[in-house]
Amino acid sequence: MAQSNAGSQYKLLAQTLLRQITDGTYLPDALLPTELELCRQFSVSRITVRAALSTLQARGVINRKAGVGTRVQAAPPRAGFMHVGNSIDYILQFTRGLAFHTIEVSEVVADAVLEDQLGLSAGQAFVRVTGVRRSASDPPTVLSQHYVPALHAGVVEAMDGYEASLAEFLAERRGDTVNEVWQAMDATRLSARAARWLEARSGSACLRSMRRYLGRGGDLLVASISLYPEGRYVFHSRIRRDHRQPP
């Protein structure tokens, strides 16, 4: 499991273990190999193994207990990609290891639809970059359209082949950081054009995310609409009640 990007190794290991659990290699209540055994089996570091196991535990697939080991809780639904997200950092990190492949670039002016979906100001000029994320051997995980303010569109060509967050990439080019992410999600169906790019069936179900990434001063870095075909992506989060008393 040799990978140049350490951030992608734990995701690849988590997906491999998830697939083994789903396929019945490890049945519910069975113990997974120890951390050391997993390190040897997949030629990865202990940090990578622990990150992968933490990802599966956060989803409720396994349970880890000192002195006992890592036990399978239940076989999860089949999915091509799993994303655990509890913070801005998790949102920004999930694309690491999945290269962005540009399909087309066009100039657009925000209309009432984009204003409603992404909160963009109608009449504002953008460069829209359309592309897919995929690993080397699998069908695309996501099709996305990124709306970059026209004033900062000089770097869009460098987005092709990028293997991390495009929002972070664009922020760094502006000497800024991603300080806030606004997002909404809903369900929709793939158009014939989107299905062709995603190597999926036209009219099939998909998850749609709409995100707006803001810099330190509240300036828009980029806005995006992403389509995740049925069965290729799972977003999982853990939400806890805040028991702290207000001051």
Image (cartoon, helix red, strand yellow):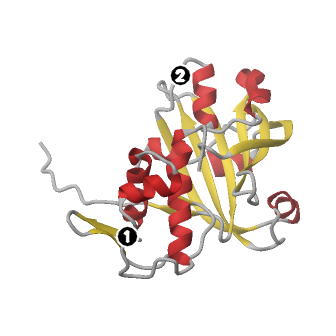
In the image, 154: left or right of 2? right
Residue 25's label in the rendered image is none
Where residue 174 sits: x, y (%)?
Answer: 60, 19
Q: Residue at x 88, y 60 (%)?
A: 193
Three-letter amino acid code at the position of disc 1: Ile
In the image, 121: left or right of 77? right
Name the element at disc 2. loop
Hey, which quadrant is residue 229 in on the image?
Answer: bottom right
Q: Is residue 230 above or below residue 44?
A: below
**Which residue corresponds to mark 2?**
176
Q: State the quadrant of the C terminus.
A: top left
Q: Residue at x 58, y 38 (%)?
A: 5
Three-letter amino acid code at the position of disc 2: Asp
Q: Are marks 2 and 1 in contact (CB under 8 Å)?
A: no
Name the element at disc 1. strand
Q: Residue at x 58, y 26 (%)?
A: 171
Q: Residues within 10 Å of mark 2 (few under 14, many from 20)?
A: some
109 or 198: nearer the viewer: 198
**Which residue corresponds to mark 1?**
62
Gap between marks 2 and 1 measured at Cα: 38 Å
Q: Residues within 10 Å of mark 1 (few under 14, many from 20)?
A: many
Q: Is residue 13 above or below residue 7?
A: below
User: Does residue 154 show up?
Assistant: yes
User: Does residue 84 show up?
Assistant: no
Q: Is residue 152 above or below residue 47?
A: above
38 or 245: nearer the viewer: 38
Q: Residue at x 80, y 60 (%)?
A: 198
Where residue 60 sits: x, y (%)?
Answer: 38, 70
